[in-house]
Image (tube, rainbow, N blue to C red):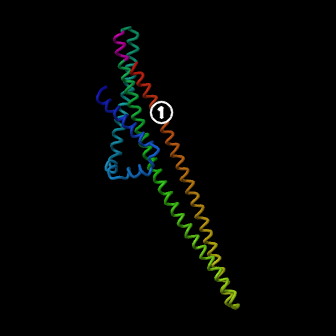
Amino acid sequence: MSLQWTLIATFLYAEIAVLVLLLLPFIPPSTWQRFFKSRFFKALGSQANLYFTVFFVILVLFFLDSIREMHKYSVGKQREEEHGHLDVEVQQSMRLFRAQRNFYIAGFALFLSLVIRRLVILISAQAVVLARAEASMKQAQSATEAAERLRKEQEQRVIEAEDAAENQGNVAREMQEKEIQKLKEELKNAKEEFSHVQINFKAMKEQAESNSRAYDELLKENTKLQKQLEIASGESGDKKSD
């Protein structure tokens, strides 16, 4: 294997290792988000898009070159089979095998680079959604407690106002009734606010559960892709051993 294909194969193995790390279930998205936001990763990420684009173009060129070699050696092998030269035919078969091996290496490296990039974006988005959901749940809980305290205070004020109204004259009674009506309206508004807070809390909880299910489906899909990669790598290894 030439130097450039050795480097590409090494990059493919590194991609597999990174993909396995990203798919580990016991590492939460928040941990990866802290790593992505670290100074070390930011120092690398400042030029990451440029490096990714350049390396992606290089992989595409090697991938196209492997396709060209496969076509060239396939045609050459057919010609040698027609002429019946065994040594030349074996040599052409070896070259065709190398071209096919390079095709699989470049193809999988190209594919995994896109998978890893997309997976990093989804993990970051999932971490942001979880953080927002947690903050919203805390905010909703705080608002619920405040609304509950306000409701109790308003009820206490209504009770006190009703007791005071019983001991006053008609004029004072009318004033107290107005105050009671006002307090009842405030209590009604507080209850409505409390109801809205509960509805928003439920909606945020459902959204967080939906995002969690989507993330689990993504993990299953990438696990399936990894198994397919292992099967394809095994088939390539069998061809090489033959």
Magenta span: predominant SS is helix
Magenta span contains residue 91: yes
- The relative height of residue 201 versus residue 81 in the rendered view (above or below) is below
Q: Tell me which residue sits at (50%, 58%) in the image.
A: 134
Q: Tell me which residue sits at (37%, 27%) in the image.
A: 102
Name the spot of residue 17 as percent of width and height, x first.
39, 38
Q: On the image, which quarter does residue 9 sit in?
A: top left
Quadrant for the N terminus, please: top left
Magenta span contains residue 144: no
Name the spot of residue 177 as percent of width and height, x first.
68, 83
Q: On the image, which quarter does residue 160 sit in?
A: bottom right
Name the spot of residue 41 as percent of width and height, x first.
34, 49
Q: Residue furthest front?
A: 26
Q: Residue furthest top?
A: 84
Q: Tell me which residue sits at (56%, 56%) in the image.
A: 205
| Front in this rendered view, residue 64 or 108 | 108
Query: Relative to 118, is 186 on the left or the right?
Result: right
| Front in this rendered view, residue 239 or 23 | 23
- For the image, the number of numbered tags is 1
- The relative height of residue 120 versus residue 182 in the rendered view (above or below) is above
- The relative height of residue 152 versus residue 139 in the rendered view (above or below) is below
Q: Mark 1 — residue? A: 227
What are the residue bounds of the magenta stretch?
A: 86-93
Quadrant for the C terminus, please: top left
Name the spot of residue 68 as percent of width and height, x first.
38, 25
Q: In the rendered structure, which amino acid carries the disc numbered 1? A: Lys
Query: Relative to 223, is 185 on the left or the right?
Result: right
Q: Tell me which residue sits at (42%, 28%) in the image.
A: 233
Characterize the local packing of mark 1: few (<14), some (14-19) or many (20 or more) Cα atoms within 10 angstroms.
few
Disc 1, SS = helix
